[in-house]
């Protein structure tokens, strides 16, 4: 079930790659919740998954401060076991990489307001940190 969620988040993100859109923020929220749940079931590397989750949470904090609409997403991770979390490592890395690229590309657009470009650049850096943390 969780793997399908990651694939759905990626598909929606591909269909609407707006860095401030609901799809991108939903993907960030989903990734953050999945990473935190992974930390709860992978005792030997839980600190790495926790730090990755916290980096994504920081990313969200940087992005939503200037946006007026709130996005909520609750992920059902009841099927998450250590084995499932291990299988999700590469799909979640792929989602984080796609998001980091989206925000890095958005930050380089000269037509966008400087304050949003700064937020997107910060988001890309936090996502890169999350990728480095994820074992």
Image (cartoon, rainbow, N blue to C red):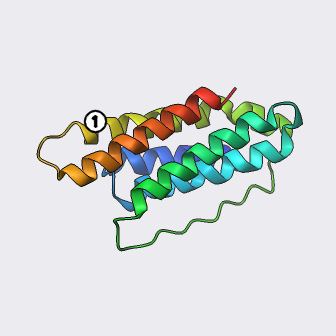
Q: Residues within 10 Å of mark 1 (few under 14, many from 20)?
A: some
Q: Quadrant of residue 46?
A: top right
Frontmost residue, 91 versus 46: 46
Residue 129 location, x and y as percent?
54, 33
Residue 101 location, x and y as percent?
37, 34
Frontmost residue, 123 versus 94: 123
Frontmost residue, 112 versus 115: 115
State the residue at coordinates (35%, 59%): 21
| Residue 36 visible from this viewpoint | yes
Q: Which residue is mark 1?
A: 105
Q: Quadrant of residue 91?
A: top right
Left or right, residue 134 beside residue 44: left
Query: Outermost residue, right direction?
Result: 43
State the residue at coordinates (66%, 31%): 134
SS for callout 1: helix
Residue 131 location, x and y as percent?
57, 31
State the residue at coordinates (78%, 43%): 39
The C terminus - image quarter:
top right
């Amino acid at each position: 079930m969780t793997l399908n969620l990651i694939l759905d988040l990626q598909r929606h993100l591909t269909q609407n790659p707006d860095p401030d859109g609901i799809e991108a923020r939903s993907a960030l929220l989903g990734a953050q919740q999945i990473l935190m749940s992974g930390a709860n079931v992978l005792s030997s590397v839980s600190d790495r998954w926790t730090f990755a989750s916290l980096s994504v949470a920081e990313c969200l904090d940087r992005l939503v401060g200037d946006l007026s609409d709130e996005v909520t997403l609750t992920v059902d991770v009841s099927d998450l076991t250590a084995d499932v979390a291990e299988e999700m490592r590469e799909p979640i890395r792929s989602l984080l990489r796609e998001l980091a690229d989206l925000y890095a590309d958005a930050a380089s657009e000269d037509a966008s307001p400087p304050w949003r470009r700064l937020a997107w650049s910060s988001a890309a850096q936090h996502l890169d940190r999350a990728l480095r943390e994820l074992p």
